[in-house]
Image (cartoon, rainbow, N blue to C red):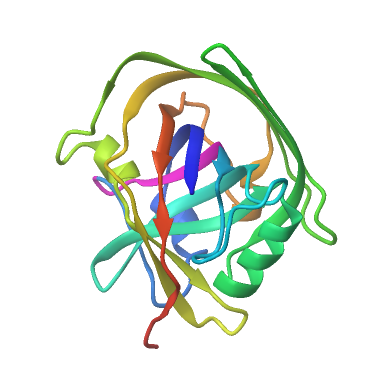
């Protein structure tokens, strides 16, 4: 599968505001003592279970996630507060198979030259309301994050963590090349996605990065010891 036209939008937040919202067994990861909350819109393409073909109308859809960063036994990864998607089959499969907090959403994705218009309204039954509307675009030349930089810390993570309804943790390993990053500009007209994390975004400008495309392989989840 591939992730396309992706924006990393990150805000620094006090670690105390997120630590209590991370499941037992995971450690909130920080950069210089500061936690980061990310909102990441993109377009998924070619999504399929291994050994099955990509299906028209099922394997490609816009997606929008809200995340922070954690460790388990020292291994850095991603923790998702929510993942909204305009693919009903994908939402149900991800919730059932990977215990990820996916939600149905009505989304619009438009590309105008280099610029991306992205809008989302959550439609999942009995889920907290959430809306998002933004326009973003890359600027400047491509680069790979420097070793030890904030950009590397925010992006170069190769697993995600999830918890089932009983709080049992699992990990999903993810393989892809190093992120082909570019700087970005963005305008956010509606930004209601962080309510589910119980965090208010600071007034400071976000840290923005853009990725045109990266090919990805996600492996089956691994149950972690209590």
Which residue is drawn at the image coordinates 62% and 62% (left, top)? 101
Q: Looking at this rendering, what residue extends furthest in the bottom direction?
A: 226
Q: Nearer the viewer, residue 118 or 5?
A: 5
Q: For this view, does 85 lie left or right of residue 169?
A: right
Does the magenta segment cover residue 37? yes
Write the residue at 34% across / 43% down: 155
**Residue 151, position as x, y percentages in the image:** 28, 35
Q: Quadrant of the C terminus?
A: bottom left
Q: Quadrant of residue 208?
A: top left
> Residue 116: image x %, image y %?
59, 21
User: Magenta region's main secondary structure?
Assistant: strand
Decide: is 60 above or below 170.
Answer: above
Left or right: 34 as drawn, with respect to 122: left
Asked if the magenta segment contains residue 135, the reply would be: no
Can I make out residue 174 in this image? yes
Q: Of 188 and 142, which appears nearest the observer?
A: 142
133 is higher (above) or lower (below) than 26: above
Looking at the image, how many numbered discs can be counted on the residues? 0
Going 65% across and 54% down the picture, which residue do you hit? 196
Residue 187 visible somewhere in the drawing: no
Highlighted range, magenta: 32-42
The residue depicted at 77 percent of the width and 54 percent of the height is: 128
Residue 60 found in image quarter: top right
Return the x and y of residue 202 as percentages of the image width and height. 51, 33
């Amino acid at each position: 599968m591939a992730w396309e036209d992706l924006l990393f939008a990150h805000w620094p937040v006090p670690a105390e505001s997120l630590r209590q919202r991370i499941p037992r067994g995971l450690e909130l990861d920080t950069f210089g003592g500061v936690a980061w909350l990310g909102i990441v819109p993109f377009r998924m393409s070619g999504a399929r279970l291994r050994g099955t073909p990509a299906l028209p109308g099922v394997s490609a859809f816009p997606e929008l996630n809200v995340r922070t960063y954690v460790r388990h036994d020292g291994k850095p990864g991603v923790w998702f507060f929510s993942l909204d998607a305009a693919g009903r089959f994908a939402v149900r499969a991800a919730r059932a198979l990977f215990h990820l907090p996916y939600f149905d959403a009505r989304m619009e994705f438009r590309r105008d030259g280099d610029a991306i218009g992205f809008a989302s309204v959550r439609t999942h039954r009995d889920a907290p309301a959430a809306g998002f509307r933004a326009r973003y675009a890359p600027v400047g030349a491509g680069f790979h994050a420097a070793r030890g930089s904030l950009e590397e810390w925010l992006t170069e993570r190769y697993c995600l963590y999830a918890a089932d309804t009983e709080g049992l943790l699992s990990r999903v390993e993810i393989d892809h090349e190093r992120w082909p990053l570019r700087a970005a500009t963005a305008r956010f007209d509606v930004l209601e996605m962080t309510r589910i994390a119980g965090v208010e975004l600071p007034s400071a400008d976000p840290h923005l990065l853009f990725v045109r495309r990266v090919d990805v392989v996600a492996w089956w989840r691994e149950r972690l010891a209590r």
